Image (cartoon, rainbow, N blue to C red):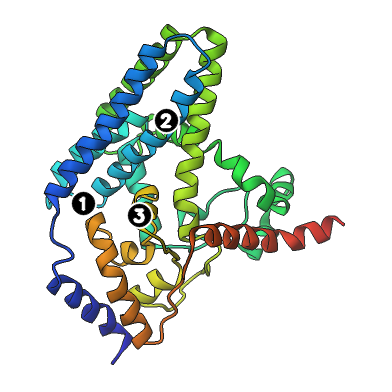
């Protein structure tokens, strides 16, 4: 059986099992509960008033905001509805609630899915202050060379800035016209910023407001980063034409995180990264059922299938970053 037919065979099996069928009822409940939790956290913010207890509210909002973003992710992959228009409506709403430019993110994320862990074409590897391969490390100069050499120690602190990076990148994309709905997305980002800063500085004194924003955005970025980092970091990277067919390109560059349904919930289904990359429009609740099917299929064809525990996945990521930075540290010595 040739490699060119492998994915067609797997896809046929997945479709026959009904794993690509829409789960609108599931998403109706999930969206309702997620938005209710998000609204409840903001209601608590309003009730507590000007107090340092709002640091706890900031943490709650970081968690709720991450799950709002997870739904935006699913909508961007057309996991909720068949048609793009309805999915985009959900995605635009959830992106606006957390201050992310939905159109910019979908374009960036689509390029990642088309070229996972490709050093030249995957935007998720285009982080100038980090290096995910020795080749990238050799290209770093100045401050970026220092940060790359110590990146295993800096990685988690840097994730605290990811929320601010997402906001800023969204603004830049709209400013430079890098999104199809430029006017709409600009209006949504302005509305989010005005409502967010207005509420925070109206309820809290300036000092507490700044601390609230730092804690909220920092923890939100950290949670988002910890949800995405295990998926590909530390897995093989490629350059040029790697010669892999679609199935192997997606499987060999991805890592699953095993665990209970609590892990599924905490990571928004992204722990089934292999299945998600093979079938991006598969509804989130179907990923757990698809996992053993895909794993067995890969085993039958001798395709390496990476899967580990949650803490082990973070250890693997940090170990890889430390090893990539080793030649840079040695050169400085």
Q: Is residue 298 depicted above or below 62 in this figure? A: below
Where residue 115 appears, as percent x and y from the top left, is 41, 63
The residues tagged by marks 3 and 1 sit, at their Cα atoms, a distance apart of: 19 Å
The residues tagged by marks 3 and 2 sit, at their Cα atoms, a distance apart of: 19 Å
Give SS at disc 1: loop
- Report the residue at 66% width, 53% height from top: 152
Q: Report which residue position mark 3 lands on.
A: 264
Q: Is residue 96 depicted above or below 75 in this figure? A: above
Quadrant, the C terminus: bottom right
- Report the residue at 60% width, 45% height from top: 156
Where residue 217 appears, as percent x and y from the top left, is 49, 30
Among the 4 quarters of the image, the one containing residue 271:
bottom left
Comes first in the chain, label 3 or label 1: 1
Q: Is residue 106 left or right of residue 201?
A: left
Quadrant, the N terminus: bottom left
Q: Are marks 3 and 2 in contact (CB under 8 Å)?
A: no
Where residue 44 appears, as percent x and y from the top left, is 36, 19
Q: Report which residue position mark 1 lands on.
A: 78
- Residue farthest along the right direction in this orientation: 333
Among the 4 quarters of the image, the one containing residue 48:
top left
Residue 195 or residue 167, whichever sits in front: 195
Where residue 321 appears, as percent x and y from the top left, is 64, 58
């Amino acid at each position: 059986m040739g490699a060119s037919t492998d994915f067609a065979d797997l896809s046929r099996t997945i479709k026959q099992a009904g794993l690509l069928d829409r789960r609108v009822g599931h998403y109706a409940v999930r969206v309702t509960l997620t938005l209710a939790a998000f609204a409840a956290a903001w209601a608590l913010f309003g009730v507590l008033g000007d107090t340092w207890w709002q640091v706890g509210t900031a943490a709650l909002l970081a968690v709720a905001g991450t799950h709002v973003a997870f739904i935006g992710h699913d909508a961007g992959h057309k996991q909720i509805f068949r048609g793009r228009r309805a999915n985009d409506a959900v995605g635009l709403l959830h992106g606006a609630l957390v201050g992310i430019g939905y159109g910019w993110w979908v374009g960036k994320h689509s390029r990642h899915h088309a070229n996972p862990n490709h050093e030249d074409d995957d935007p998720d590897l285009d982080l100038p202050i980090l290096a995910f391969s020795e080749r990238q490390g050799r290209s770093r100069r100045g401050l970026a060379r220092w940060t790359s050499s110590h990146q295993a120690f800096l990685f988690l602190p840097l994730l605290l800035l990811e929320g601010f990076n997402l906001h800023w990148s969204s603004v830049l994309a709209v400013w430079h016209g890098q999104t199809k709905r430029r006017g709409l997305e600009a209006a949504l980002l302005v509305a989010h910023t005005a409502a967010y800063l207005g509420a925070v500085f109206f309820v809290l004194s300036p000092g507490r407001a700044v601390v609230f924003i730092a804690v909220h955005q920092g923890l939100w970025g950290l949670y988002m980063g910890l949800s995405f980092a295990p998926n590909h970091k530390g897995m093989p990277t490629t350059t040029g034409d790697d010669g892999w067919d679609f199935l192997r390109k997606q499987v060999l560059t991805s890592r699953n995180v095993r665990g209970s349904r609590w892990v599924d919930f905490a990571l928004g289904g992204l722990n089934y990264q292999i299945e998600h990359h093979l079938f991006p429009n598969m509804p989130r609740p179907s990923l757990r059922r698809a996992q053993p099917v895909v794993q067995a299929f890969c085993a039958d064809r001798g395709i390496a299938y990476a899967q580990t525990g949650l803490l082990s996945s973070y250890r693997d990521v940090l170990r890889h970053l430390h090893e990539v930075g080793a030649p840079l540290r040695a050169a400085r010595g």
